[in-house]
Image (cartoon, grey):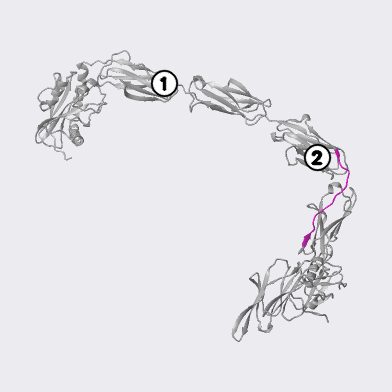
Amino acid sequence: MEDMLDFHETDFPALSKGQVPMLLWLLLLILAPGREQSELAPKAVIRLTPPWSTNFKGKTVTLTCEDSHSPAQGGISWYYDDILLKKKSGKLQIRNSGYYKCKTRGSSLSDPVHVEFLSDWLILQASLPVFEGDDVYLRCQGWKEEDITEKIYYKDGEKFAVTYDSGFIRLNSASTNNSKYHCTTYVEGLFGMWEESSKALRIQVQELFPPPVLTASPSQPIEGSPVTLKCETWLPPQKSDTQLQFCFFREDQALGSDWRSSPELQIPAIWSEDSRSYWCQAKTVTHSVMKRSLKSQIHVHRVPVSDVNLEIQPPGGKLIEGDNLVLTCSVARGTGTITFSWHREGTIRILGRKTQRSLSAELQIPTVKESDAGRYYCAADNIHGPILSTLITVTVRIPVSRPVLTIRAPRAQAVVGDVVELRCEAWRGSPPILYQFYHEDATLGSSSAPSGRAASFNLSLTADHSGSYSCEADNGLGAQHSDRVTLNVTVPVSRPVLTLNPAGTQPVVGDVLELRCEAQRGSPPILYWFYHDNVTLGKSLAPFGGGASFNLSLMAQPSGNYFCGADNGLGIQCSEVVMLNFTVPSRSKITPVTVGVILGLLSILGLAATAALVCEFRTQKKSGGISATGTARSFGTETQESTHFESPALMELQPVYSNVNPGDRDLVYTLVGSIQHTKEHLANSPRLHWKHKGPTVIYSENKKRHWRPLHLSLCTQRKSYMSTQQESSYLHSHKMARKRSLTRNQSCQHLDLRFQPLKL
């Protein structure tokens, strides 16, 4: 019977207590796992009986150390928590929890096996050993199994299985994912039901086979000789019947017929260009486990190249953008496959690379661009390192692009006399560039840009310079024309001329006189202003140029100075002053007007009388009405004296009308006349305040009566003029207006009207 292992001092060599720690330290340094064995040696494997990782306290587990030569041939070493034990037999019985390892003379150290002995009521057991890709068996065991009816299994806290007997469950394709498992159950006792839970368990998964190692024979072959590649790995004794497949790679390219059962690959002939990194992969047939080797560099010896030369087509290396560039790299000597590469100075990127069994290679760069200009060289390499050629310069000339014309003026709108800059610029094009400037289709001039930048042309504007402009750029590789740019040159207005229509006749009061103002030059639109003695009469716009007119109705004698002004935004120009004298028409010219007014009034007598009542009522509300003393007030005027009155100065009586004040039934008023003033008379009339240029209506109190017939007086006056004293006397005579004439030449007609009261 094998010895039972309960650790105490007798398990170690007979040493004093002070020497034991030193011995342990030396053993760790000398016999540490893997130190005395090659990495290529297969690992030993520990087998458990019974095959469970967790057991109840007091139970015994037997460990057996195995290698590829089963049973193991002597020289077996056992380790407990990395401490070397004195036990040398192939089997070891244990009762203590911990990590156990073993190794034999023909193997490397085994993977550690953790065996745990627990005094818990419920434990979770996992089968051992477990290799990558194997199925794992879990069993939930109670101290008193007969008291358990249901077992619940958890993975990382999530329930995944339930059993109702003492059997086990199976997990497929184990992997080292560090998941935690535990189980729970409910136990029925004298005091009722309670829940028991096992300690968490991590499944111990051992390596099915180590990563393979790639070897080449010979390791440094000569160019053209065969090479054998071998992908080596080992299976544990328990898995010796597992079938593996192998695949070989050069860089990232598979060699041979993909996966094969043989761990060897024969290369009939290897060349210098085959000097690359090689590696292999090993996997199980079921693809459950796959591992790859590290990369191994294989160097193939060959004769180095020499005398590398670069040639360029077209000869001289002078190209136009869009041409094709051909670079030919050649060597004088060299064997085997040669790798040619092409480069441009100052750039890291390789322009091209070709590997072939020849002494020369060609690279074509189609449709060269400006960025392709520079100095080129090539390199040739057949494993011994690249050999560089001399540098050759390549120039690329760029045809000019379509230029852009810009016009720079000193102000927002160009004006005659301004100096504008015509700037022509082509964004691309090899220098020098010749620029031509055009107005319409006529050449203005040219300018050369030696550095290829833009060129300018200064132009002093005249009225004839309005129109379209363009420019042309040419560097000898084809001319390009710009788009047309329109320039509008604004012409300031000339001094306008004021003319009268009709011309040559003496204007009289009552005529309509046309004032026409016209500037011979000036860009439209033109705004014309008309003035009488510095007073604005009106304005008129000529959108398309030419002149403008203003009709002046001669209602009084507007003698004086007339002139006009023209403006198109560049400053106003005024005409010469024209002095006009007007004549007063004879009585024969006025009489028909008066008669026509009287007849028109008689035809609409009823309507006029009613309107008069309404107007008088509104007038009194706005102006304050007539004073109790009968003083006359001007209709529609303000009480504040105006200092800007510019109406004609002469007073003329127009047809007057009698009106009724509807606000007072006892008052009847008569319209006795309308008065217009010129500037001369305005100064002599301080008591009257004029606001409007039109005639001012004057009312006079007729008499008080209780709605008796109304007497309407229609009066006209010949062109008789009153002095200030006469005018004042006339205004005070309003009470007697119906009994006598207003002036010596006044003619009146009287009508009797009857009105009904209006309720306003």
Q: What is the magenta range?
A: 290-306
Residue 121, quarter of picture: bottom right
Image quarter where the C terminus lies is top left
Residue 48 pos. (x, y %): 78, 75
From the image, give the main secondary structure of the stretch colored magenta. Answer: loop
User: Residue 322: where, in percent of width, then height?
Assistant: 71, 33
Q: Is residue 625 left or right of residue 357?
A: left
Q: How many marks?
A: 2
Residue 123 is labelled as none
The residue depicted at 36 percent of the width and 21 percent of the height is 549
Tell me: residue 355, above or below residue 679.
Answer: below
Q: Which quadrant holds the N terminus?
A: bottom right
Query: In the shown orientation, is residue 358 left or right of residue 147?
Result: right
Whether the magenta-drawn stretch holds residue 364 is answered as no
Question: Considering depth in this image, is 8 or 534 the residue closer to the camera?
Answer: 8
Distance from disc 1 to disc 2, alpha carbons, whole Å, reads 81 Å
Residue 638 location (% of width, % of height):
22, 32
Q: Which residue is drawn at 72% across and 35% down?
A: 372
The residue located at (62%, 84%) in the rendering is 188
Query: Which residue type carries mark 2?
Result: Ala
**Residue 300 in magenta stretch:** yes
**Residue bearing mark 2:** 379
Front position among marks 1 and 2: 2
**Which residue carries the number 1 mark?**
546
Disc 2 element: strand
Q: In which quarter of the image is residue 498?
A: top left
Please rate how many residues cluster around mark 2, counting C-alpha atoms within 10 Å: few if below 14, some from 14 to 19, many from 20.
many
Residues tagged 1 and 2 counted as in contact (Cβ below 8 A): no
